[in-house]
Image: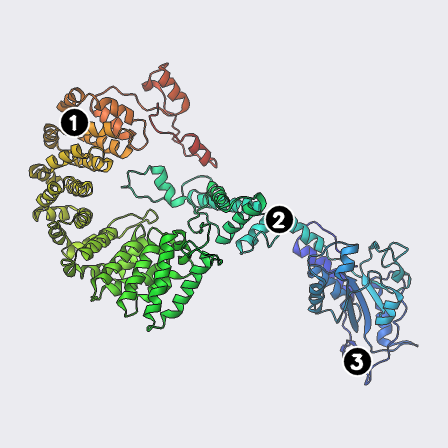
Amino acid sequence: MLAFPLYPTQAEASYRGRYDRAMAPVRLNIDPSLRPGTSNTSSEPERGLAPEQPPNSKPNDIEPFRKKLKEGEPGTKTGRPLRLYADGVFDLFHFGHAKALQQCKEAYPNTFLLVGCCSDAITHELKGRTVMTDVERYESLRHCRWVDEVVEDAPWVVTDNFLEKHQIDYVCHDSLPYSDASGASSEGDVYARIKAMGKFLETRRTDGISTSDLIIRIIAEYDTFIRRNLQRGYTGKDMNVPFIKEKTIKFDMAMDNVKQRFTDLFGRKGRLVCETTFHKNDSKTPFSQRAAMTTKPKMQISQETFDECVAENVADFDMPLAEAIADAVQQFTSQGVDLSNVIKSSASAACADSGDEPQEPLPARLKRLIAELRALVADQQQDEQVLQLVAELHAVCDAVPEARVVAGRNDAVDTLLALLDVPSAPVVASASALLTLICAENADNQDFVGAAGMQRLAALLSRQHEETETTARLLALVKAVCVKHESNKAHFAKASGVEALCNHLTSAREDELLSIQLAFAFRVLTINDDPRATFSQAQDTVKTLVAHDVIPYSLEALTHRDSKLLASWLAVLKQLAITEENCQQIADLGGLATVQRVMQMNELNPSIVKRCITVYRNVAAADELKRAILQSGGVECTLLSMRRHESDASIQQHACATLAAIALRSPENSHALVKLGAAQQISRAMQAHRRDVAVLRQASLAVRNMVARSVELRSHFLQEEPDIEPLLREAQQYRGCGDEAYAALRDLGCEIKLSSFGAAAASAAASGSIKATMIKPRFNPVQVESNQLLDSVEEAAEAPFAQ
């Protein structure tokens, strides 16, 4: 039997040198007429035994016999192939097997090589299980260039009858004894009798490669190969891997992806190699969470994996279906897996009618509907059937939120986008509504829209549609695919989509629904809300809108009485007020008075009041217009709204920010604000929302801006509003507003503790054993590389100024 031992890894050159030396004696220039199939005789030679050869002959000893074959001797025939036989299991056929067979084939100038391969039955009994079946091993040998004939189901021990049946001259194998597990050989060596007969031809092993070696490599890298196959679509069941083991390996894979992502961001030694983008104006979200928005990977599983877990809970733990689903959800979510793409409905067909007949699984139902819809896209005469399929798909996605993800991953987005080109207005409207549903707050489906989809939307909106409902649905779709997706916004702008929207300004005057949807689209396109994007085209969009006179249009829209319409166009006006020129244009057109009138007429509507205050906040950023807001009565309206909507944190936050902007670098304005009662309202806002970081931050900024250049106002804040100082001290402990509260206390002239860094310094300062000013900061100005950045960050991750 051919078998090859393990060997230590060696250089390729050294290996090739050993192999060439082993093969050199048998590579002779033989007359081509003596090779198989090129006999110089006119008829088939009579078969006969080869010349006798001494036992245990080696390749170097073959030359005399080769000479006899070539020159001939009495009693033998020349010109016929010499029949050599090699046997083995040949599992996982590799180049070591091939080189052994090459030695056999080239041992004589005219050789016919038979290769025997044992069957599964005898191999499994006497040696052990194989990776390949016997049929696969037979076929592997047939495709080896050195093999002339394959003997299937070869015997474990070569017998005289076998030699005579196949007229074998020599049996080839390496010289090491091969133990006979079958007991057929009395000597214990399978080839002992062949060696005694002088019919054994020794071959050389190829170091470093064997079937056992390959199997050991796989076993040693078991988890690696399991991961490899899981990534290629195989399941744990295919590889006989237990369910829990499969989930553990998948979780480890996800963690490796997280580590790789961290390495890509921060380098191997913890140094920052690329910036993390976040939305700086989102003051409600702590910095750490905003930064994590771009670095946290999203781990997901397939529907089949979730269903298998549920089935295992039911089968192995006798759980009811609802409990099995809840347990599976809890297990996956605890590992950080995002299940938004998995349908968790216990019926698997949430929208199907109840009955005794088995229901179609919901994933299969979605795929069927999308496939049928795709087949009808090219046929523009089947509007009724298309509408029916779209309505059914809409009902499923509306009832089961996870179905929207599944639909998007089964080509629903491209199919529905293709329906937008049909001439039927009802089809376009229904397809737009469904696209809006599945793309809303779904980044994956927004990605599927892409550049081609945004160009199609821009082209559709550049045309005037007879039915305003169709246009309104398309505008709603623009909003849905662009929310928090800077790439789609850029594609839409490059396709002249902003100009196409401006073409509907005239028709929107006569239709409130169209006007609201147009305002929604404008606002989405002018806001920087995508934390993944490094740059935003919002300012370019604002320039385009201003060039199309959207500012006067927005102020004209504020003359309507519909609250939803007012709120939507106030939001647009706030987005346009980002430059001094735009703010000045708003003021020149009487925008401040218009906003004040809207606020007074809708003083009980918190949504409109907040929008009006945000407009004041942006306009107050222009130094020339701060006084104009004071003189127009905008501050009085703002303070009145703070009293009336004291429980609304959003109104309090924007109102305090507006007061802070008006007081910034203006002592005159600060005195005017204090006289109007701003200090009292700021104090009440901090009391009502003493744990809201966003409110506390803006309130602290307002106090600081009022007293920073007006020292005489300090006494008013400390004496007339005695609650402000303790509120500011309490605000110091919160991350996100501690610095602002510290600055406000400093400018108020209050006695404050300096911040201390490090556990030892903090405990010493808290106990009063040493003065805070005497604590030496633990700061190392030398750049030191470290591979323990995460541990250090987590250890020191605590709110500044914490008590």
- Residue at point 16%, 19% (across, down): 719
Question: Along the horizontal axis of the image, is 353 left or right of 708?
Answer: right
Residue at position x 37%, y 25% in the image: 757
The image shows residue 307 at horizontal and vertical percentages of 51, 51
Asked if residue 664 can be seen in this view, the reply is: no
Residue carrying label 3: 39
Quarter of the picture containing the N terminus is bottom right
Q: Which residue type does callout 3 highlight?
A: Ser
- How crowded is the residue under tag 3: few (<14 C-alpha within 10 Å), some, or many (20+)? some
Q: CA distance from mark 1 to mark 2?
A: 70 Å
Q: Earlier in the sequence, mark 2 or mark 3?
A: 3
Lower sequence index among marks 3 and 1: 3
Secondary structure of the residue carrying numbered label 3 = loop
Q: Amino acid at mark 2?
A: Tyr
Residue at the extreme right of the image, as rendered: 74
Residue at the disc numbered 1: 680
Q: Amino acid at mark 1?
A: Gln
In the image, residue 379 lies at what x, y percent?
35, 73
Q: Quadrant of residue 541?
A: bottom left
Relative image position of residue 62 (x, y in whole percent): 84, 66
